[in-house]
Image (cartoon, helix red, strand yellow):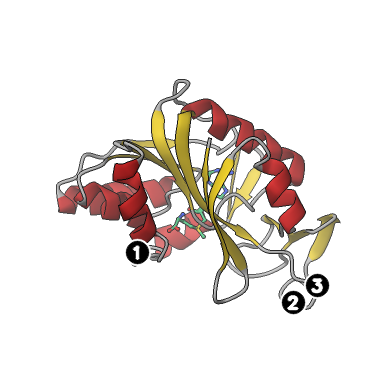
């Protein structure tokens, strides 16, 4: 477990132990394949890219891909994989709340299994940062952990604010998990156009595509 900038990130040790944590792209990528050309997407940021499964997927398809993550071991794994595929490695070690990119740098931002790892105030700040680095009319493709009052998943966790839990064990021990209500999602995206909104089959996440 590693603490960077005051944030605990158990994923760092996980990537050190097993660099290829995630290999298959999320299913929503097939919809992004159709939407990205339609919206003139060329340059993509994967926010919380981990070991780079989506950087490789979209890099192979010819997009200019950039990744940022809080885990240096994750970025090392991503860099190695990108190198093997002959895709330029454009990676930044950064907290999602403070991105080292200029305003309107990207046509699309991806973020899978990442944005929930914050307290809600920090999630709001992250959305402002996403709005800053995404160009007007750019696309955000993401999933968010879903609030489910019937779920047992966080029964043994510590609730640190409404719907935000800190796990006591496992890879994500010490990391916050905010579970989103639909109202929260629509509140965060009130100035966005929602293009796709779905509950994943596992019922644990919402999958969303929104346009700035
Ligand atoms: C479940 S993994 C998902 C990785 C990748 N998005 C994927 O789908 O393969 C969660 C990722 O979020 C990153 N992460 C957690 N907190 C972060 C933060 N505050 N800023 C940037 N990345 C963060 C972790 O290092 C880890 O790579």
Q: Are marks 2 and 1 in contact (CB under 8 Å)?
A: no
Q: Are marks 2 and 3 in contact (CB under 8 Å)?
A: yes
Neighbor class of circle 3 (other Cα within 10 Å; few <14, some 14-19, many 20+) is few
Neighbor class of circle 2 (other Cα within 10 Å; few <14, some 14-19, many 20+) is few
Q: Position of residue 119 (x, y in %)?
A: 74, 46
Depicted 196 relative to depicted 100: above or below: below
Question: Label 3's element?
Answer: loop
Q: Mark 3 highlights which residue?
A: 149
Q: Where, by quadrant of the figure, is residue 29 drawn? A: bottom left
Q: Position of residue 201 (x, y in %)?
A: 54, 76
Q: Position of residue 153 (x, y in %)?
A: 71, 75
In the image shown, does 151 or 108 lie closer to the viewer? 108
Q: Which mark is residue 134?
A: none
Q: Residue furthest top?
A: 102
**Residue drawn 51% across the image and 43% down it:** 70
**Residue drawn 72% across the image and 57% down it:** 182
Question: Label 1's element?
Answer: loop
Depicted 65 relative to depicted 112: above or below: above
Q: Are marks 1 and 3 in contact (CB under 8 Å)?
A: no
Measured in 3D between alpha carbons, the distance from the residue under mark 2 to the one under mark 3, in whole angstroms, is 6 Å
Q: Which mark is residue 151?
A: 2
Measured in 3D between alpha carbons, the distance from the residue under mark 2 to the one under mark 1, in whole angstroms, is 29 Å
Q: Mark 1 highlights which residue?
A: 20
In the image shown, does 76 or 138 lie closer to the viewer? 138
Q: Quadrant of the N terminus?
A: bottom right
| Any part of residue 77 in sight | no
In the image shown, does 22 or 173 lie closer to the viewer? 22
Q: Position of residue 13 (x, y in %)?
A: 49, 58
**Residue drawn 68% across the image and 39% down it:** 190
Question: Label 2's element?
Answer: loop
């Amino acid at each position: 477990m590693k603490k960077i900038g005051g944030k605990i990130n158990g994923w760092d040790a996980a990537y050190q132990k097993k660099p290829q944590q995630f290999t298959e792209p999320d299913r929503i990528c097939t919809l992004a394949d159709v939407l990205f050309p339609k919206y003139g997407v060329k340059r993509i940021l994967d926010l919380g890219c981990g070991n780079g499964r989506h950087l490789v997927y979209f890099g192979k398809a010819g997009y200019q891909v950039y990744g940022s993550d809080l885990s240096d071991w994750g970025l090392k794994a991503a860099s190695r994989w990108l190198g093997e595929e002959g895709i330029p490695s454009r990676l930044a070690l950064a907290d999602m709340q403070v991105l080292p990119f200029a305003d309107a740098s990207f046509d699309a931002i991806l973020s899978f299994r990442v944005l929930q790892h914050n307290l809600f105030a920090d999630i709001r700040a992250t959305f402002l940062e996403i709005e800053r680095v995404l160009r007007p009319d750019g696309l955000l493709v993401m999933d968010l952990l879903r609030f489910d009052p019937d779920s047992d998943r966080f029964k043994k966790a510590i609730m640190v604010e409404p719907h935000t839990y800190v796990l006591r064990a496992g890879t994500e021990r010490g990391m916050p998990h905010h579970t989103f209500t639909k109202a929260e999602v629509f509140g965060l995206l009130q100035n966005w156009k929602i293009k796709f909104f779905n509950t994943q089959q596992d019922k644990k996440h919402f999958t969303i595509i929104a346009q700035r």
